[in-house]
Amino acid sequence: MTSYTESELNEALRIADGAASIERVKDIVSDALLAADPSARVMRTEYFNHTYIPDLVVEWPSRGTNSLRRVYLRPTQDPGQIDIDIKERGSTRPVFVHLSALLPQHNDISLEHLSATARSAQSLVTEIGSFERLAEHSTAPGARLLPSSVLRGGRGLLESAQATAAAQTISRGFAGAILADPESTGSALATLESVLAPSTAVELTSVLETMWIASGAPLSQFPRPRQDWTTTPWSAPLSPDRLRALLRAVSPELHAFWRTIGHQITLDSFEGMNILGDDQLALQSIMESALDNLTARTCRILDSAGSENIPDTLTWHVQHGQLSLAAFGRRSWFGQRSEDFPAYDSSDDRRPTPQGFTDVAVRADISITRVDLANGSRTLSFGSKDGNDIIGDDMTASFAQNLGEGTVVDRAVALVESRPVTVDFATGTTFGRPNARLKAANLLWTTWTMLAGLTKSQWASFSRTIRQSEAGDPHRVYLESNWHPATLLARSRPAGELTTRLSRLRNELDRNRIPETDFRQAAQSGDYLAMLLLGMLLESKDETVEAEMWFRNAIEPTSGEAMVALASLLERQGQRVEAERWYRRASNIDFRA
């Protein structure tokens, strides 16, 4: 069956005006090559069917200055003539597109001989309809890379029928790799070896290998190709080139696949990339698992520009190779150098009052070891020599009073993973020591909770996204076998009394049947007790997401009922690491009946 492109080519060859016919032929071939790989650039020469000068040159600017293929258009039916062409110019990996069907009976050169000559010279002999067949039959996730791979590194004789068979086999292999089927995957590997030069085949093999691992099957069972091939080991971080290939080849809607890919992501995986459009859906899935693995030294958060429309849902972005998180009209960047981030706006004063700073640190469960206060030209710094948490220390209020009304917090030093991290309110930046590598999730938590000015409704949403997983935390492993919250609370008389108070409050709620609207109105007006009671009421109705939000909002530095309520809810949800932190903080409150 003749393809649309082949029909167009046949009509172009029948144009009476020779110059017009040649131009039309070049139009059709150029369009077909660009359809095979939209990232390529096709340039024309002034020649046609020249012995040495190509008709077209295909370049891949993103792959370097030496990444190109010369394309020779041949209106011959003689395979012997193309065989001679290959032997004369095979060192440049050319592509020969024959414009008429090859007829091997013209001489003693068979099509099999021609294919062997082309394969040994890493040259491709094909007809223009082959690229259309490759695209039509490369339907499985991953196999969509085949047309562009053939254009960049195809070899041998690839006629339309062969292109169809190869695409079907490779597509079945990619579909089989997701199911860990060794037979179809092995057949695809053999076909890749046949139609692609080794360097290009390795790229597709690495993608196929990635699909295999995404199925959950061990890498040791992957049906490897020839022994002289080498692929990047799965244990290595995902390179930008491989990530680009996956984004081109795999649907962004395959959530489970992209979550698996996220385990091999580092910040370097995004180098030089812009992830836009539908690929952003894949990025969100990637980051669900990648966040646990990423490390950084510094993070900056800024209010969005007036022209930037940022939704309330937390969304990951990659622009110019830089990963960022945006939500609630703000965007944050993290990495090893703050110089790589956008400049801060010096007119944006986000410095909190000492009391506001203390409230946020308690609610975020962040230990503070030093605070720098400022009031006009006067400054005052104080901290703990032994690195203990100074939040709740009466000296904080005393120092603020000494500086007078209008005192703000300029800087603070927080403990993140037991290491000092400076929180600079003037620049909206957090940063560790020069060589520090902190978990990105922990650095983001410190940055957003301390610097973003989150509202009560935003806090719980951010918490669920950034602290969604405690897997892999060695502290969690210990807690799984040593979890005794009752014993923990019993060590502290204050925490025990808080638990008793909560029980009384729950009993009163059950007896009095106060309408939820009454609690909600008072809670929204800032009444901490109403926030706690509303959370308890919602929890009793199994509306745990909103209940958690109100428990967090109800937390005060000197009042522990909400801490215990939150810890109890987190415990039932299996979030034992954070639950234990809140139990311990409640146990340390200087409680007075």
Image: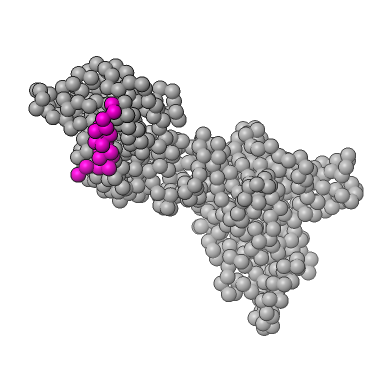
What span is colored magenta in the figure?
Answer: 1-18
Q: In the figure, 90 relative to 375: above or below? A: above
The foreground one among 376 and 157 is: 157
Res 360 quadrant in image:
bottom right
Res 512 quadrant in image:
bottom right
Q: Is residue 441 left or right of residue 428?
A: left
* Quadrant placement of the C terminus: bottom right
Q: In the figure, 380 relative to 392: above or below? A: above
Question: In the rendered image, is residue 40 in sight?
Answer: yes
The foreground one among 501 and 170 is: 170
Residue 310 appears at what percent x and percent y?
Answer: 61, 51
The foreground one among 217 and 367 is: 217
Residue 441 appears at what percent x and percent y?
Answer: 58, 47
> Is 2 part of what is drawn in magenta?
yes
Residue under the image location 42 percent in, 35 percent down: 39
Question: In the rendered image, is residue 289 in sight?
Answer: no
Residue 220 appears at what percent x and percent y?
Answer: 31, 41
Q: Would you say the magenta stretch is mainly helix, strand or loop?
A: helix
Residue under the image location 50 percent in, 42 percent down: 275
Q: In the figure, 175 relative to 81: above or below? A: below
Residue under the image location 72 percent in, 47 percent down: 368
Residue 398 appears at what percent x and percent y?
Answer: 87, 51
Q: Is residue 505 left or right of residue 153?
A: right
Q: Is residue 249 left or right of residue 7?
A: right
Residue under the image location 60 percent in, 35 percent down: 336
* Quadrant placement of the N terminus: top left
